Image: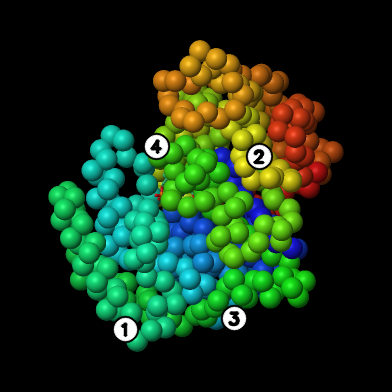
Amino acid sequence: MIDLLLGLQWGDEGKGKIVDVLTKNYDIIARFQGGPNAGHTLIFDGNKHVLHTIPSGIFHDKALNIVGNGVVIDPVIFQKELENLSVYNIDFKSKLLISRKAHIILPTHRLLDAASETLKGKSKIGSTLKGIGPTYMDKTGRNGIRIGDLELANWKVKYRNLAEKHLNMIKFYAVELDFDLDQLEAEFFAAVETLQKLTFIDSEEYINQALKQGKSILAEGAQGSLLDIDFGTYPFVTSSNTTAAGACTGLGVAPNKIGDVFGIFKAYTTRVGSGPFPTELFDEDGATMSKVGHEFGATTGRPRRCGWLDLVALKYAVEINGVTQLMMMKGDVLSGFETLKTCTSYNYKGEEISHLPYNIEEDNVSVNYTEFRGWTEDLTKMTEASQLPKNLKDYIQFIEDFVGVKVTIVSVGPDRKQTIMV
Ligand code: GDP
Ligand code: IMO
Ligand code: MG
């Protein structure tokens, strides 16, 4: 069976940490979508690592890591990730396998991302500027370059044609962009050579064989359900399906092979980039979440917007994904709040509703909250469910009842060890 681990909010829920915690139970960890727009933070033995493309199982001896066909890979960032891990003496050739069908982010994709955002002006998406949107556009436009192309003698011809097309598009956009193409290309081709030393596989075949042999696989999502290209807060979303179905297309596994769907959420909500965020806070409470939770993007360093937990949105994400177990992160950050709030319905166009409507915008949705008494205990040293404060247990119980799924992990700090199974 293949289990899925998916973010249920706007990303940065703590997926990397939990994949790392769960890896001991799996033979294979596989990324299925997104690219280096992701930043997955792992903390153990006093060290912190941020992974962008490499699956979060890489630190465990036993597990194989696969970058699936649904992922988009920037060779330059990938190479840096490999270099950052050099002290660990990981045998990447045997432990990190890359799908031939994964698409490649070219330097000019990054430039197109920047040009597109500049053109959008005030209505920009707040993209991470990693070239994600343009690369998926070339994939669906049937122009993309794939990892498997790097095994062909003439791949540079394909590269040149596509890069030229991009440069013409940038001219057409007529925005001021400052770049040195020679330098970008030198860096890119050097990184491709590093990539070519790794193992490329037909990952859908590999994964299905592994499943037949009874191997266990965990699919690691990137971003979050509310950034899904179909079901997120469009157009302020990313360019891939971040939800459960994305694992099927991004790895080549059939829906009936899916076992558990782990849905991971923060005890409050954060969002980086633009777009609607009905429970966003602009007061002291939001500032406290930001400060105590160190809410800065792992990829871009941008401050994350903070707000109360939105149960209407969470319930929607649970439904879309078929979540079977919930994991609640960062409860420790809420210690010391006298009162906690969760959004349990929206006021939308004069009506009270409890689902996510077609389009939420700052001025057409307001929220109704249910309040809870907070707790003051420091959770970060707790190791057992029995130690958790009663008010936190009540908070969790309410969430479980609202969305109809049990919480099985409560995370009480960023370290691998600060994880309570309940
Ligand atoms: P991901 O993209 O979903 O993997 O999440 P990120 O790594 O971008 O962001 C999660 C942040 O929260 C990271 O800085 C983690 O180290 C941190 N983190 C994860 N779980 C917890 C937790 O339970 N408590 C606290 N205080 N921090 C956590
Ligand atoms: P992880 O995997 C949080 C956001 C960007 C922007 C929008 C589109 O770490 O949870 P893109 O670069 O994809 O074109 O940006 O999506 N975004 C993320 N926000 N966590 C992420 O990944 C994100 N990846 C993209 O901020 O609003
Ligand atoms: Mg992140």
Residue under numbered circle 4 = 274
Tell me which numbered mark, 4 or 3, is placed earlier along the sequence.
3
Type of residue at label 4?
A: Ser
Q: Estimate how packed mark 2 is, as few (under 14), some (14 to 19) or many (20 or more) residues with alpha carbons within 10 Å.
A: few
Residue 154, given in percent of the width and then of the height, sits at: 31, 83
Residue under numbered circle 2 = 319
Q: Estimate how packed mark 4 is, as few (under 14), some (14 to 19) or many (20 or more) residues with alpha carbons within 10 Å.
A: some
In this rendering, the answer to whether 345 lies above or below 211 is above
Mark 4 residue's CB less than 8 Å from ligand 2: yes
Residue 311, given in percent of the width and then of the height, sits at: 63, 30
Tell me which numbered mark, 2 or 3, is placed earlier along the sequence.
3
Mark 3 residue's CB less than 8 Å from ligand 1: no
Residue 361, given in percent of the width and then of the height, sits at: 43, 26
Which residue is painted at 33% across and 79% down in the image?
A: 155
Residue under numbered circle 3 = 94
Type of residue at label 1?
A: Asn
Left or right, residue 257 beside residue 346:
right
Position of the C terminus, as image quadrant, is top right
Type of residue at label 2?
A: Glu
* Disc ID at residue 64: none
> Would residue 210 be seen by someone viewing this image from the given angle?
yes
SS type, badge 2: helix
Which residue is painted at 24% across and 50% down in the image?
A: 115
* Disc ID at residue 154: 1
Which one is closest to the eye, mark 1 or mark 3? 1
Type of residue at label 3?
A: Ser
In whole angstroms, how far apart are the C-alphas of marks 2 and 3? 37 Å
Tell me which numbered mark, 4 or 2, is placed earlier along the sequence.
4
